[in-house]
Amino acid sequence: MHPPKDLRELLVKAANGSIREQELARLIQICRVVSETYVLHYRSSLLALLSFHGMTQSDLAYDCIAEMFARDEAGQFYRLQRLLSKLSEPSDTIDDLSLFLAFRTLVTKVANAQLSRTYAQCDPTGAKIMRNIRDHLKCSRALMLVEDFRGKVLRPRECDPLDHLQAFPLELLEMELSENGLLLQPTPHILKEVDRLLREQDQFRRSIPLFDLVRLIRETYGHKAPTSRDAEYQIDLEGLDEDELRSLHQRVVQSLNEKILVTYYLKKKLNDVEARQLSAIMTKIVSDWFAGDAITDSYYQHAQSVLLLSKEEYESHWRQRIEYLAKVAKEIIANDLENGL
């Protein structure tokens, strides 16, 4: 992808708050192309996993860039402001290629973090298996985690990776690990066998994609993709004072509105009226979470109180979007509480 000629002007305008809606849409389009290219070429294994949950390459790309356009309390695009402030030269003198490379680095960094969160939301079981593998690899003297055109891959240390050969067949890996019931063993045993299999052969590359191993383990345990339900749970906000609750509440609602704008409205999945209706529903849901009372209403009841929907209308047009955004909101709350706000 060549550096867009209008990138400099769009970034400067976004950073100083003078960007118009049409120009913002153009900047979002550039972000989408960069993000989608990254997802396609460097996260293809993850794309295959998430497609099981109905997410397309384009959906993932838009989800990934939503964070790029998050605003601070003053309504500023703080990530873009920070990008320009950290350039090696002023934004009006830096060459087009260097500016684009800095921009692309930020987009892919944000995209990578969002992909991990999206995967954790869609497949918590697979995400748990992946974290377990990564944790063990941190102290492994045999295997290491590197990145190539396939994304994250496991590779033996101090060993020729044989990257000029064809990929290690997933079928062979599955057969070898399944034969002795190793996929049911603790993670260290599985990784030890993976290391042995890769080292003791010279017909294929000595590496396997991380997501392929996760999928094998997950399928062996018989886990299925979690089905979404309308039920809610009481979010534990104990210990937060009034100012902290208000700040967190505003941050969650603002993040959801940005997600609705980028994921649904700008992609023309919802018109202006529907986007505002979805925003009103999510605002009511989140506000009830922060009210402090026990939550008894289902998402459908929240939606019905705003739009007077029938159950059929809710199921066909709103349920998936509302449940997805509710997961996003819970993830934001969990991350903020974990990081001490």
Image (cartoon, helix red, strand yellow):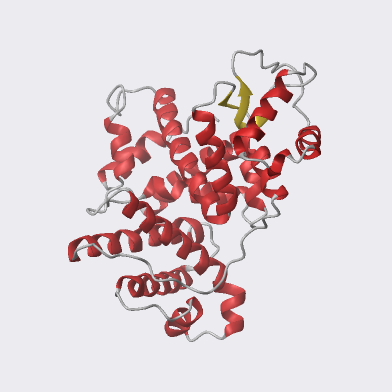
Figure check: 289 above or below 111: below
Tell me, yes or no, if residue 46 can be seen here.
Answer: yes
Tell me, yes or no, if residue 23 can be seen here.
Answer: no
Q: Residue at x 27, y 48 (%)?
A: 17
Q: Nearer the viewer, residue 268 or 251?
A: 251
Q: Residue at x 77, y 16 (%)?
A: 202
- Position of 197 with respect to 298 (left or right) is right
Quadrant of image for the N terminus: top right
Figure check: 23 above or below 103: below
Q: Residue at x 39, y 71 (%)?
A: 234
Q: Nearer the viewer, residue 284 or 68?
A: 284
Q: Residue at x 23, y 64 (%)?
A: 246
Figure check: 96 above or below 232: above
Residue 124, image x, y percentages: 55, 53
Residue 100, image x, y percentages: 43, 29
Residue 302, image x, y percentages: 44, 79
